[in-house]
Image: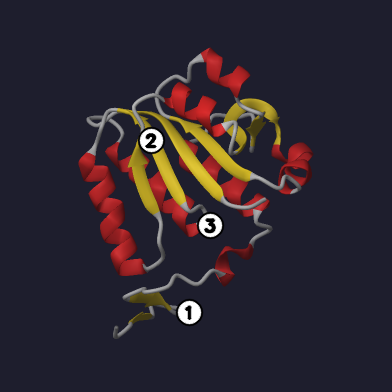
Amino acid sequence: MKHIFVLRVGHRKRRDPRVSTHVALAARAFGAEEMFFSGDKDPELVEKISKAVTNWGGEFKVQYVRSWKAFLNTWKSRGKSVHLTMYGVSACDTIEEIRLIDRDLLIIVGGQKVPRELYDLADWNVSVTNQPHSEVSALAVFLHMLNEGKEFEYKFKGAKIIVLPSARGKKVMESVL
């Protein structure tokens, strides 16, 4: 696949700011290039992630889209889409097929109850488990599987803060730009 993107459907500014922030952070850390979100317009969400990227490096972006449906319909000319849902086919049974696509990949996670129509529009409806769980955990597990655990190898250009692996305690290095 060429590039990975995430679409967060149904963000609610009053209820979901922390979860949507975590979706964006997980998307970035596990290799996505950009997160789009629908629902409530939320400049604070965009600003929080922009600050994280400034400190931790990389070029990850967050962008609001007014209509998830219009966005997804437009996306179809660009790439394929995976909707993460506990009701989907096991990621273990679909991951190899998804890895083989040669187009951009959009991973969709819900916020509020996902409209039935999304299940029909997505190219795949995939689960990482058939038990209740969060969209953050589903995204992280799926991206980990998709990228075969290579997230520890990612380098984030321009990082001001770098974590040094340590068996005990915290080792953080501040880079000098």
For label 2, the residue is 37
Q: Depth check: give the residue in front, 10 or 80.
A: 80
Q: Which mark is residue 35?
A: none
Q: How far apart, in angstroms, are the residues tagged by discs 1 and 3?
A: 22 Å
Crowd rating for badge 3 (residues with CA inside 10 Å; few <14, some 14–19, many 20+) = many
| Amino acid identity at mark 2 | Phe
For disc 3, the marked residue is 31
Label 3 sits on a secondary structure element that is loop
What is the number of the mark on residue 166? Answer: 1
Dot 1 lies on which element? loop
Which amino acid lies under the numbered mark 1 shown in the image of this protein? Ser
Residue 64, percent from left and from top: 33, 36
Specify few, some or many for label 2: CA neighbours under 10 Å numbering under 14, 14-19, or 20 or more: many
Mark earlier in primary sequence (2, 3)? 3
Q: Do tag 2 and tag 3 residues touch (Cβ < 8 Å)?
A: no
Mark 1 or mark 3, which is nearer to you?
Answer: 3
Q: Is residue 116 left or right of residue 60?
A: right
Quick check: marks 1 and 3 in contact, CB under 8 Å?
A: no
Answer left or right for 118 relative to 101. Answer: left
Could you say which quadrant of the image residue 21 lies in? top left
Type of amino acid at the residue the image marks with label 3: Gly
Residue neighbourhood size for the residue with mark 1, other residues' Cα within 10 Å, grouped as few (<14), some (14–19), many (≥20)? few
